[in-house]
């Protein structure tokens, strides 16, 4: 469609509206202020392109309890760009200022707009920063104001606009309104006040109206300048001073005529498209109304069915309750009767009462035949009573243990009871989840799952620092905390306590229905803040036998050409070399923790810490032959079984290799702690290599700890001389590979 055809189409649309083919009353919804829910009154355009009544913006400022207000430029006030029309909210604000209800050093008489204000847009809910000039930076939406006025006129077509010059009772109906004089006139008064040959004859006049829009929009920042350009970045009109040295100096602008043409063409095309799709829109409206009815009916049906199911459950529970309570009552009555009968029997054994009293009376009988006849049966009863005294047993058991009801399984089933459309619970992925200062928890959904709306991750602390497992019910433990809604398969939890045990669980939500919780998983946070570093390729790095990846977080030991040539000359003996590499960041204070992974196939790897002085010795005095006893380190290679540490050295290294971890042999004077069997047997000092190993250096306490990073179980600890700057140190011999742990996001961690 050509430009001329577009403009013709747009003109035809406007004509249809003016002819009444598209009643202006039908657009009332577009003319309602989102705050006061009434027709716009002097609407202002917010930076987000939504419009709000002038008085409503001021009401927002009052409600937000801003400290200072400023009237700003009159170009954004109702009426003329150079006139001020008081509004009820302004008068209310003035009363508040005069009464002292609002006071601030920034107040001055007549100030009603805040210097620096932020208000929420009622349309898009975004915070709108009005800047230092406040409302004065906002343009009047003159076009919307005119449409509202036309709507008002259409609504009160029977009410005429009267001449502002004529006085009752001779007041005539207005026929014209002067946009310059901002008054309405009848024919006679208009001729009288706009005579030919005078400047007033050049005034712009329109049909009778009460909406006197400004003839020219003025720049709110430069009040004496007309807007003549359009900023494409801010999407608002600007003047040439704004472009030359104002806030729009570096923004892309276009001429007002070009912007007018482009926006008008876009609007015409959009309107044409919507009108051409009117039948489709009506069909879709019919479908939506049908869906609304179906939703209402199906919702009521589902509610009735759910109520029926619960009623049946209630009835079943009530029946079972009655039966079980009846059983308890019957057993109680039977036992009570038995015990009461036994009490009566024993009361009969008392003197002058019951059986004993009767026997005493029988003894008074002197006739032998009568006595024998009665005494035989009485003696049997007395003998039975005597036996019962010797072997006393209650007639009934007062304990009702067999009637204890275990309902935990049923309670779990009831808690997990859900609709058929409830999503399956996700599963937390232990292999990809990591916990440091922050926890990065990942989860996965079932393979045949439907799309979910969001997830909720919950966590709680089971045990805090310095608490034993028996203290898991301490203060602040066991309280579940939830993250915000998560729309992906992972979430990050901030500000976890060090050296604490945490439990995590997650559930999914679809259509406002939550899945059951995933099985809980526990993670132990490190004993110190995470220490982020990379391998250094500057200090002592051997390019012949060590290979670093581009990220410098993985190092691998390989046999270089020089190594092979040297080995070719070797006929006897064992010439070995240990290639060291350190971290690019040192430690001179505090507690720090780092973790890494050693590949299980690695031949021999040493990990730990070393001071800068020891590193200088290692790197500046290379040795082609490394004897296990050359240095007292933690080497567990051939012949090192008898090697042990001195009391304190400027380095500590732990040996791993061939899928094993070797605990160093400690001398009697060493301050060493290990969680393993006695050190006498070498086999007891050999452990399976952990999947991940963690090291914690307490510089101030001169102590280093080695952990299984998955369980945070301390495998070994000892003193270390921290007289200089300590660096993470690693040594590799033969084939081996070390990969540093990728922390959640090192930039986010706070040390």
Image (cartoon, rainbow, N blue to C red):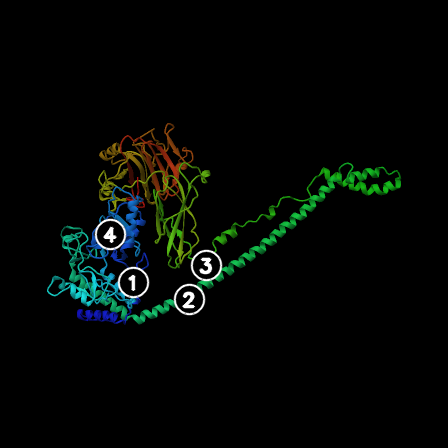
The answer to whether one can see residue 461 in this image is yes
Q: Nearer the viewer, mark 3 or mark 4?
A: 4
Question: In this orientation, which residue lies closer to the viewer: 163 or 392?
Answer: 163
Which residue position is annotated with label 4?
Answer: 135
Q: Using residue 410 as the reference point, say whether residue 566 is left or right of it.
A: left
Which residue position is annotated with label 1?
Answer: 30
The numbered mark at residue 294 is 2
Residue at figure coordinates x 71%, y 39% from the top left? 391
User: Which percent across, then down, holds residue 497?
Assistant: 37, 40
Q: Residues within 10 Å of mark 2 (few under 14, many from 20)?
A: few
Which residue position is annotated with label 3?
Answer: 419
Sequence-wise, the earlier of marks 3 and 2 is: 2
Label 3 – label 4 distance at C-alpha: 52 Å
Tag 1 and tag 4, C-beta contact below 8 Å: no
Sequence-wise, the earlier of marks 3 and 4 is: 4
Q: Is residue 368 above or below residue 297?
A: above
Sequence-wise, the earlier of marks 4 and 2 is: 4
* Quadrant housing residue 240: bottom left
Q: Residues within 10 Å of mark 1 (few under 14, many from 20)?
A: few
Q: Using residue 198 as the reference point, say whether residue 670 is left or right of it.
A: right
Q: Nearer the viewer, mark 3 or mark 2?
A: 2
Label 3 – label 2 distance at C-alpha: 19 Å
Q: Residues within 10 Å of mark 4 (few under 14, many from 20)?
A: many
The numbered mark at residue 630 is none
């Amino acid at each position: 469609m050509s430009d001329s055809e577009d403009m013709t189409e747009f003109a035809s649309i406007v004509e249809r509206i003016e002819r009444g083919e598209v009643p202006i009353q039908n657009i009332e919804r577009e003319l309602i202020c989102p705050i006061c829910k009434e027709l716009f009154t002097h609407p202002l355009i917010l930076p987000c392109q939504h419009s709000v009544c002038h008085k409503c913006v001021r009401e927002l400022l009052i409600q937000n309890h801003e400290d200072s207000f400023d009237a700003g430029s009159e170009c954004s006030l109702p009426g003329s760009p150079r006139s001020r029309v008081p509004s009820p909210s302004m008068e209310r604000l003035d009363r508040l200022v005069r009464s002292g209800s609002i006071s601030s050093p920034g107040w001055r008489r007549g100030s009603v707009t805040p210097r620096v204000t932020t208000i929420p847009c009622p349309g898009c809910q975004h915070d709108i920063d009005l800047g230092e000039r406040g409302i004065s930076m906002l343009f009047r939406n003159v076009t919307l104001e005119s449409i509202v006025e036309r709507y008002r006129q259409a609504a009160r077509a029977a009410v005429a606009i009267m001449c502002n010059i004529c006085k009752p009772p001779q007041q005539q109906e207005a026929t014209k309104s002067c946009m310059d004089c901002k008054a309405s006139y009848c024919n006679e008064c208009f001729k009288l006040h706009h005579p030919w040959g005078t400047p007033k004859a050049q005034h712009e006049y329109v049909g009778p109206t009460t909406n006197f829009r400004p003839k020219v929009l003025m720049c709110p920042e430069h009040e004496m300048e007309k807007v003549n350009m359009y900023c494409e970045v801010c999407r608002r009109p600007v003047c040439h001073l704004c472009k030359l040295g104002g806030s729009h100096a570096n923004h892309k602008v276009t001429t007002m005529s070009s912007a007018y043409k482009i926006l008008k063409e876009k609007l015409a095309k959009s309107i044409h498209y919507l009108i051409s799709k009117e039948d489709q829109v009506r069909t879709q409206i019919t479908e939506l109304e049908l869906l609304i009815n179906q939703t209402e009916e199906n919702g009521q049906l589902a509610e009735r069915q759910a109520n029926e199911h619960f009623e049946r459950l209630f009835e079943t529970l009530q029946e079972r309750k009655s039966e079980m309570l009846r059983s308890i009552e019957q057993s109680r009555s039977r036992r009570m009767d038995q015990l009461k009968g036994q009490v009566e029997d024993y009361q009969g054994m008392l003197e002058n009462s019951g059986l004993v009293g009767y026997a005493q009376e029988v003894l008074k009988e002197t006739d032998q035949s009568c006595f024998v006849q009665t005494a035989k049966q009485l003696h049997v009863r007395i003998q039975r009573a005597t036996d019962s005294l010797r072997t006393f047993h209650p007639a009934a058991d007062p304990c009702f243990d067999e009637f204890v009801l275990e309902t935990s399984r049923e309670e779990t089933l009831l808690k997990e009871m859900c609709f058929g459309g409830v999503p399956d619970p996700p599963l937390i992925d232990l292999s990809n989840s990591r916990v440091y200062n922050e926890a990065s928890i990942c989860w996965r959904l079932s393979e045949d799952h439907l799309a979910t709306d969001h997830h909720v991750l919950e966590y709680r602390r089971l045990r805090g620092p310095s608490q034993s497992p028996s203290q898991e019910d301490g203060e602040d433990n066991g309280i579940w905390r939830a993250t915000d809604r998560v729309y992906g398969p992972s979430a990050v939890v901030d500000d976890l306590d060090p050296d604490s045990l945490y439990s995590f669980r997650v559930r999914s939500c679809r259509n406002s229905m939550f899945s059951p919780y995933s099985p809980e998983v526990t993670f132990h946070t490190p004993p110190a803040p995470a220490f982020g570093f990379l391998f250094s390729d500057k200090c002592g790095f051997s390019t012949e036998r060590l290979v670093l990846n581009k990220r410098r977080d993985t190092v691998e030991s390989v046999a270089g050409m020089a190594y092979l040539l040297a080995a070719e000359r070797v006929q006897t003996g064992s010439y070995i070399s240990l290639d060291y590499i350190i971290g690019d960041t040192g430690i001179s204070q505090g507690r720090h923790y780092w973790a890494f992974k050693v590949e299980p196939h690695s031949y021999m790897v040493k990990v730990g810490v070393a001071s800068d002085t020891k590193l200088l010795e290692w790197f500046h005095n290379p040795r082609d032959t490394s004897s296990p006893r050359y240095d007292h380190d933690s080497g567990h290679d051939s012949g090192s079984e008898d090697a042990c540490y001195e009391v304190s050295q400027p380095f500590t290294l732990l040996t791993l290799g061939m899928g094993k971890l070797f605990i160093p042999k400690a001398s009697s004077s060493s301050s060493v702690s290990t969680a393993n069997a006695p050190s006498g047997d070498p086999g007891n000092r050999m452990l399976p290599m952990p999947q991940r190993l963690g090291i914690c250096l307490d510089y101030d306490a001169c102590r280093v700890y080695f952990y299984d990073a998955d369980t945070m179980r301390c495998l070994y600890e000892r003193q270390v001389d921290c007289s200089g700057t300590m660096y993470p140190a690693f040594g590799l011999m033969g084939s081996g590979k070390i990969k540093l742990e990728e922390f959640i996001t090192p930039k986010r961690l706070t040390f």
